[in-house]
Image: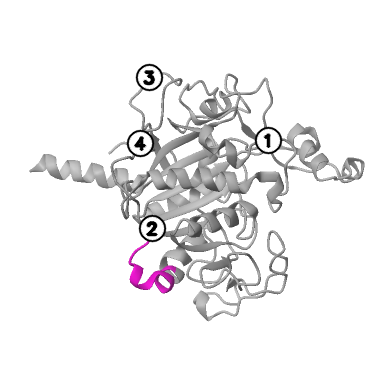
Amino acid sequence: MKFAWLFIVLSCELLASGGSAASRNSRVLNNNSCGENQPLNILLTNDDGFDVANIQALFTALKGAGHNVLLVAPYGAQSGKSASVENVGVAHTSKFAGTPLAALEVGATTDDSECGTVKAGAPPLAMVSKSTTTGGGDDEYYIVGPPAVSVFYGLDIAGPAFFKDRKEIDLVISGPNTAPNFGFLTSHSGTVGAAVTAMNRGHRGIAFSAGRAAGVVDHCNPTQYNPDLIAALALKVIDSVTCGDKVTLEPSTGLNVNIPSTNGKTLEDLENYKFEDTEISVSGGLGVQYFSNLLDCRYARAVYDARGVNQTLLEKFAPLPGLCFLSSSSEMAGSEVAGYPADTNAIGEFNTVSGDPEMLTVSISKIQTILLVVRKEQARQQQDRK
């Protein structure tokens, strides 16, 4: 079997039937014949940390809409971890070689949680107390590790204990991320990786990502991200892939949803947004390149400036090697960026979202795991043999 068109963790396919980018109202959101939707059992995670503004706003909004929601998310930022896992099966130290991880005494955290609601010295996995965050209780956990580990813990341990008689998990939601996930970034994204981890286990998943205004760096500050509007947009998508008490997505499939920057918008703008079917495309106007000195990268300098870092002091420690994003007005979709091919796909996510000057277009791309593609191919071959 040949699957040359697949890439690393997921494949993508267009939901629309074709045509120009100008008239693609999403078929995903065309769900008017199901009557009143019922509450879903939802596992919620992210890659930014359990206590950042976006996930807490969505957590509150989902529960407010009547859904049964279990939040299991990383203790701190885990961006770019894709579907990576850590400490599986045995400890990775010579002292404990071959010892099951459950038998080890794992040390306390050495740093505060991402937004400081849990202080250093806490256990590496814990239920969040009700006094810690607005949504805390037996429905909220943090875990030290990448997003995929949170998903496994939610599916295998916390989920069965929490949902009990409410049967199985209907939907796994990851995000909303505090930055977009277009193009090649989807294969690196911890947000998308968490959704794919659940999809590999036969679940349906949605990865939500939201753009941010230039200079916005504090994802713990709700005033910088407009998390309530982002959550309301996410609810629209979730409600529209729900029919009664069922999610209409096929098992092992999901969505990659990108919401443009909500800077300057309010909840009053909610009904002005449109949702369009898109494809996960190529570069999405971005590139990643390794620099021998990050001070030569404009994006890194902008981040340092936004965070008030003294660049004169940084120069004393130069060179500072590392990865950096490349993007500018001349390096957008029509140009090659850092070796990534030009993104000329008119129905690609980036071109669809950035092509709206009012920033009111949400892109929806369907994703499916390689396992699903393989199973479909195996079923087709079995049918051919009959």
How many neighbours does mark 2 have within 10 angstroms: few (below 14), some (14-19), or many (20 or more)? many
- Residue in view at x 64 percent, y 65 percent: 133
Tag 1 near tag 4, CB within 8 Å: no
Q: Residue furthest left?
A: 386
Q: Is residue 252 visible?
A: yes
Q: Which residue is mark 4?
A: 30
Q: Which residue is mark 3?
A: 19
Quarter of the figure with the N terminus:
top left
Q: Which residue is mark 2?
A: 40
Give the mark nearest the N terminus, 2 or 4. 4
Which numbered disc covers residue 264?
Answer: 1
The magenta stretch is 159-169
Q: Give amino acid for label 4.
A: Asn
| Mark nearer the viewer, 3 or 4 | 4
Q: Main secondary structure of the magenta part?
A: helix
Give the mark nearest the N terminus, 3 or 1. 3
